[in-house]
Amino acid sequence: MKRPSALHSSPVFAELLNGIPHGIAILDRDLCIVTINRFLEAMIGHTAEEARGVYGEFILRANFGSNNQPCKEVLETGESLSIDGNIINRHRKKISTHFTLSRLHDEQEQPIGVLIVLEDNSVAKGADSIGQEHAATNEILGHSPQMEEVFELMSVLARTDASVLITGETGTGKDMIAEALHKSSKRARQPFIKVNCGALPEALLESELFGHVKGAFTGAVTETVGMFRLAHKGTIFLTEIGDLSLPLQVKLLSVLDDREFFPVGGSKKVKVDVRIIAATHKSLRQEVQKGNFREDLFYRLNVLHLNMPSLWERDGDIRLLLDHFLRQFSEKLGRNVTGFSQEAIDFLIDYHYPGNVRELRNIAEYSANICQGQMVEMKDLPQYLFRPEKSSPTNSASIPSSPSPSSVEQIQSVENISGGWAGIEKEMILDALRKSGGNRTQTANLLGWGRTTLWRKLKKYELA
């Protein structure tokens, strides 16, 4: 058998490694990287060129043993090892991984290196399309009618290869939806690459997306393949697509149309087979009208559309999520926090959650850390929740931007309403009922609530 350093340069061998749907790393006798395949490039965020010659532990940041001890053991004994663990990639994401380590030897049976196969466990858990779909959607919690509609649409979107645009407020879970769509698709065993279009300046983002050739600009001492090439055969997720600059929008449109592009400073086009999922909290239609977003790109991205409802619109999901996250953080901290007191639950169910699920999760984490007993009391909740402008569910998001004369009169006479915020809320419900002629669906829409929330409020104020 050839030495690993000679073997990796063979085009046939490289193509063979790239055809394996798992991460592959070959280390030499000094446990330095000889080569990695394309799938592992996508997992860790480093290219084979960047990794070559680097000590394996610095590239494969795994938790299966310090100082590459398992690799040393395999190299010495020749016995293969199979280990479950995780790796931390370049973007600081922890990936649950199954490692298989085997010794490589020459024709005289002398050890010359180690072969490491890394299997992404999040993909392995969904071996068939039905199993993948089930596993992916089970990671996203919700039993409200609004989320049932999302799950139903996801099952359709996962079976196609068209571009998807995911919209919704910040914190609604657009990232999880994008990854679930990938895991439920035929590309599930291929890379899923996430790029935040609002996190980098235009010049750096172009290089991050499309790569650059050596010498393309000052500091470009090596070639970089870019995220589109790392996502080849898989999915690229462009979050905050509304922040993409107009010049990069043109280049992205070209990729969508032709499936090829020029790396920065390059003169040779690169072809890619990539599914694009984009997400934004902005209204791209409004951005098009303002001249900030290209209309033709909007329509190419918006082939399929999924809108994530805000948490306040998800009837009944608040209690489900509060219990889930509290149990999760309680177990993680080794605490015995079993739930929320009735007073705390009533308060949290009525809270508006401008930060959506992300904010709710943070509240549960804070409570699990602060609570000294078995039940989370009001004193264990974050103090910012009790500020009047935050604690009232009838904040600016729920009040019409152009109030009617009766609404203006109501707001001007707040001091005369007994019962504080409860009195104000009751008056707003009565006002909305009058406007809708008693139609509860229209009343809920006027107030910005779901029907379940309105029903609960009607019972609370004895208006039902």
Image: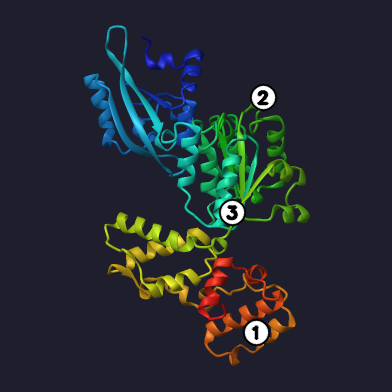
> Is the residue under label 3 in contact with that under label 1 (CB below 8 Å)?
no
Quadrant of the snapshot with the C terminus: bottom right
| Image side of residue 435 versus residue 95, left or right | right
Please tell me whether mark 3 or mark 2 is closer to you in this view: 3
Query: In terms of depth relative to the viewer, which is nearer, 80 or 416?
Result: 416
Q: Which mark is residue 268?
A: 2
**Circle 3 crowding by C-alpha within 10 Å: few under 14, some 14–19, many from 20:** many
The residue furthest bottom is 416
Query: What type is the residue that disc 1 sits on?
Result: Ile
Quadrant of the snapshot with the N terminus: top left
The residues tagged by marks 3 and 2 sit, at their Cα atoms, a distance apart of 40 Å
- Give the image quarter of residue 439: bottom right
Question: Which residue in the protein does label 3 denote?
Answer: 308
Choose the circle earlier in sequence order: 3 or 2: 2
Q: How many marks?
A: 3
Q: Is residue 168 above or below residue 67?
A: below
Secondary structure beneath label 1:
helix
What residue sits 61% from the left and 29% below the top? 273
| Image side of residue 129 versus residue 428, left or right | left
What residue sits 42% from the left and 14% below the top? 7
Residue 199 visible, this orientation: no
Secondary structure beneath label 3:
loop
Choose the circle earlier in sequence order: 2 or 1: 2
Query: In terms of depth relative to the viewer, which is nearer, 222 or 401?
Result: 401
What residue sits 68% from the left and 38% below the top? 252
Q: Position of residue 326 (x, y in %)?
A: 37, 60
**Circle 1 crowding by C-alpha within 10 Å: few under 14, some 14–19, many from 20:** some
Q: Position of residue 311 (x, y in %)?
A: 54, 61
> Is the residue under label 2 in contact with that under label 3 (CB below 8 Å)?
no
Q: Is residue 49 above or below residue 14?
A: below
Residue 284 visible, this orientation: yes
Q: Which mark is residue 411?
A: 1
